Amino acid sequence: MNIRHHIFAVAAAAMLTTGAYAADIKLGVAGPFTGGSSSMGVSMRDGVRLAAKEINAAGGINGNKIVLVERDDEAKNERGVQIAQELINNEKVVATLGYINTGVALASQRFYQEAKIPVFNNVATGTLITHQFPNAAENYVFRNAAADNIQAPMIAKEAVEKRGLKKVAILADSTNYGQLGREDLEKALKGYGVTPVATEKFNIGDVDMTSQLLKAKNAGADVVLTYAIGPELAQIANGMAKLGWKKPMIGSWTLSMASFIDTAGKNGDGATMPETFIQQPATTPKRKAFVEAYLKDFKPKNGIIASPVSAAQGYDSVYLLAAAIKQANSTEGPKILAALQDLKTPVEGVVITYNKPFTATDHDAIKAKDVVMGVVESGRVQFLNAEDATAKKK
């Protein structure tokens, strides 16, 4: 072997080892792939993987392949900060997708803002997330999830306006997500002239909600509204059953997670929540194809995606970002940002078709009209209202 061939062979071997080429487009993917929030994180990651696989199979973005750099933030703020610095400084990512937990997003995304690299929140819903840097000349934070200031009014409307339940108890966890969501919920209830008869807090990992539930019961609550993450929601449903206290449970979208449904079992039936995506029935051909491809590739337990909302939004986030990079014909952060704020071609996603989803002053792609109410029935999330099960998403 001459020297020239030797150099080529070494370079080729290196590329095969790393799976990376000079023109690859490296995207960070950050979320909790272990722990209590992992059903959301893994579903999001797999949705991202599926979209990247499809785009690469179709030729990539302007001929360049997407390479995902995945990191498990364990739903810990400090871990999220470490990962953000690593992805920016060492991996040199073009953008990062992810964030399941509002607290992790708020702690981490300032590094992307400072580096002028877009960060695309595809699951975290804290209202503050896209407004964290109000005085910045440019905002590098985008989102395609239903913010809490969309969900909270829907929860209040379902309880107070539709069911006439005005003696409200709020149970929220102590994370940034739970407490910021509680504030949005209290604001929404205030619009109906309703003040909660009980407002209770609990910590991640708590397994006994008896104390909080007894306070709500003794205060005369006729509905329990929740803002929480992880399996603790199931402890609320199971605690109510243990007390023989049967009241409606209405809360944020996390009530659709497998970690709630599987642990609560029959006690979870009737739990109601806002949803951007419900696995069945598929209401568009795009949704049907997405679910079939996801089940084929990842084979979730019993054919049920652990967090369908996370999977769908993760999938859509890749296509939105890819459209912006294609339009910008560049991987420079400021040029991607400009393209995201002025996407000229509609992007057909699973949740909706995104038609100019962002502007310079609005970085939230999902609006109230894009969200429906779901309900847990026999271990699955169903559409609460029959008309939503047949309506075509636009």
Image: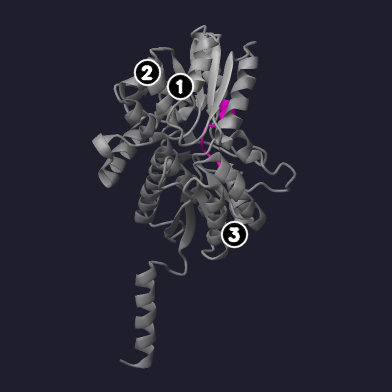
**Could you tell me which secondary element the residue under label 3 belongs to?**
loop
Q: Which mark is residue 242?
A: 2
The kind of residue on which mark 3 rests is Glu
**Could you tell me which secondary element the residue under label 1 belongs to?**
helix
Please report the residue visible at 32 percent of the width from the left and 27 percent of the height from the top: 280
The kind of residue on which mark 2 rests is Lys
Colour scheme of the picture: one colour
Circle 1 crowding by C-alpha within 10 Å: few under 14, some 14–19, many from 20: some
Circle 2 crowding by C-alpha within 10 Å: few under 14, some 14–19, many from 20: few
Q: Is residue 79 left or right of residue 341?
A: left
Q: Are marks 3 and 1 in contact (CB under 8 Å)?
A: no
Q: Dot 3 corresponds to which residue?
A: 332
The kind of residue on which mark 1 rests is Thr
Q: Is residue 257 above or below residue 327?
A: above
**Mark 2 and mark 3: Cα distance apart in space:** 56 Å
- Give the magenta part as a residue range: 143-150
